[in-house]
Amino acid sequence: MSVKRIGVLTSGGDAPGMNAAVRSVVRTAMFHGIECYGIRRGYNGLISGDLIRLDEKSISHTINRGGTILYTARSKEFMTEEGQQKAVSTCKFLGLDGIVAIGGDGTFRGARALSKRGVNVICIPATIDNDISCTNYSIGFDTAANTAIECIDRLRDTMQSHERCSVVEVMGRNAGFLAMYVGLAVGATAVLVPEKPIDFEKDVIEKIRRARFNGFTHYMIVVAEGSGSAADIASKIKEAIDLDPRVTVLGHIQRGGVPTGRDRVNATKMGYLAVEMLLQGKTNRIVCTKDGHFTDVAIDDGLGMERRIQDIEVEVLAAMTGV
């Protein structure tokens, strides 16, 4: 397959490491003599033709930057047949031989729509939620987890000093991968995730009591946003045992910051592989990791997979929290 000109876009929620992936796509394209254009503001930019030529200078010193230099947006227009056709027309008019789309499930669905209309597309998973079913790892997860861990470690100092209970809400949409990972890393008293039905008395109250019997006077409850509001959890704790928890919602602070080494390296490898796959004539594929190796799957297959929290994590959490 002859590839002379490609585009790269970031879509959906931003994730640390997106810039490293864009940089890798550009550098790999340049290595093969391919022109590379950045499509700004996701699929909105593809509809409107908001492109910028990317070269050595434009991606210089971006590997360590959080966010995305291409900006990102969720496009309602692209969800329509008319919007998708406009995007395809832009690709044809500009002579783009392929698109590298960096993002999560919504980004992949958009890429699949383009592929069905004849556009060559390769996807790179990037979401702090780490909820892309076909891959063990998504760009941004490691940085977001470390940011949350650092925040909770700092918060614990205050909670311990004042002998308080803290309820911390972390991001993750409807998935608990980030909350479970962070909860294990900070030694939380309890972790609530949407994948596991909550028995409030057993999963929260009894664990607080057990911690108190063991001599602790401060308690850390980590809540995935998909499991409910941290404020509601705090209210139920107060009602049950007359303890007055402090609520902290980490929110979008988890999305920002300098990407970790792991996110930079994985993003760089995935960006490289995405361009190589286009050169091999592949399309409608997702670059992913499985059992420590990089591979790829069809977008249709990837979106149809289901990912669950590992049993070992549930078992370890039960042992660590003593209930």
Image (tube, rainbow, N blue to C red):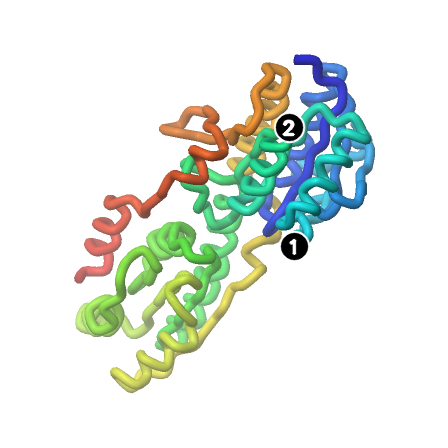
Answer with the quarter of the image where residue 4 lies. top right
The amino acid on which the numbered mark 2 sits, given as a three-letter code, is: Gly
Q: Residues within 10 Å of mark 2 (few under 14, many from 20)?
A: some
Residue placed at 37% from the left, 81% from the top? Answer: 235
Q: CA distance from mark 1 to mark 2?
A: 21 Å
Disc 1: which residue: 76
Q: Nearer the viewer, mark 1 or mark 2?
A: 2
Residue 68 at x, y = what percent? 68, 45
Q: Quadrant of the N terminus?
A: top right
Task: Give the residue at x 51% y 36%.
Answer: 262
Amino acid found under the numbered disc labelled 1: Lys
- The answer to whether 232 appears left or right of 281 in the picture is left
Name the side, left or right, on which 279 lies relative to 166.
right
Q: Secondary structure at mark 1?
A: loop
Q: Label 2's element?
A: loop
User: Looking at the picture, does residue 204 appear above or below residue 96?
Assistant: below
Label 2, on which residue?
118
Viewer-proximal residue, 149 or 251? Answer: 251
Q: In terms of image quadrants, where is residue 96?
A: top right
